[in-house]
Image (tube, coloured by chain):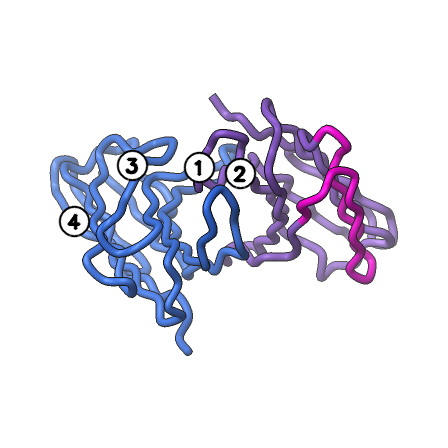
Amino acid sequence: GQQVMQIPQYQHVQEGEDFTTYCNSSTTLSNIQWYKQRPGGHPVFLIQLVKSGEVKKQKRLTFQFGEAKKNSSLHITATQTTDVGTYFCAGILTGGGNKLTFGTGTQLKVEL
Amino acid sequence: NAGVTQTPKFQVLKTGQSMTLQCAQDMNHEYMSWYRQDPGMGLRLIHYSVGAGITDQGEVPNGYNVSRSTTEDFPLRLLSAAPSQTSVYFCASSYSIPGGAYEQYFGPGTRLTVT
């Protein structure tokens, strides 16, 4: 079954509201990556986290890697219509060699 | 640089037909992979390769074959298409490190329908 789950599956927000998606793995991850896929497009890399407890920011986006390296989150402050898309986490499961496993994704819709 | 290119963009097959999805990259990346994307399932790894002549199975390899004769190309072959293989297929490439991962560059995708 799916080893990397994301919640929620869908999120509708009003422009200006905050948004968070959570990524949970059944096993520890050696790293975590985040991607954004616009409707009709392909996934585009946003960031990679490697260290336990690591926090990185990109403008309105904050990424966090859990202390146990089994979960991660992406938080967007004051969403804009340009944030619309599906956000995926991805990581190498411990013992997974070079296999990059993607999460199930969270689809974000932003309404004016 | 063209990045990662995929052909065709769209394809309709009848059950039992075979075909090859093409993927090429011009970034000299060692790591290449194929994913399929289905609603609510995220991106599932079909096959991947860490260099020319080396391939391995991902989560959902059944019904698909791959080979990697050059660094640039990584074709995906559907042996006998089934309706369950209706999906969007993405090829991706990156630099490679053992047990780790770099930024994945994705192609534009191939939308496949099997009737």
Q: Are marks 4 and 3 in contact (CB under 8 Å)?
A: no
Can you say whether B28 is above or below A5 in the image?
below
Subunit of mark 4?
B
Q: CA gap, disc 3 to disc 2?
A: 25 Å
- Quadrant, the N terminus of chain B: bottom left
Chain B color in figure: blue
Mark 3: give few (<14), some (14-19) or many (20+) Cα within 10 Å: some
What SS does tag 2 mark? strand
Sequence-wise first label, 2 or 1: 2
| Label 2 sits on residue | A92
Determine which of the numbered discs, if any, sits on residue A97 in the image: 1
Subunit of mark 1?
A
Residue A54 point in image, percent of width and height:
77, 44
Q: Are discs 3 and 2 located on one and the same chain?
A: no
Question: Depth-wise, is mark 3 or mark 2 nearer the camera?
Answer: 2
Q: CA gap, disc 1 to disc 3?
A: 26 Å
Residue B31 point in image, percent of width and height:
39, 54
* Residue shown at 53% from the left, 54% from the top: B102
Q: Are marks 2 and 1 in contact (CB under 8 Å)?
A: yes
Q: CA gap, disc 2 to disc 1?
A: 7 Å
What SS does tag 4 mark? strand
Magenta-tinted stretch: A49-68
Chain A color in figure: purple
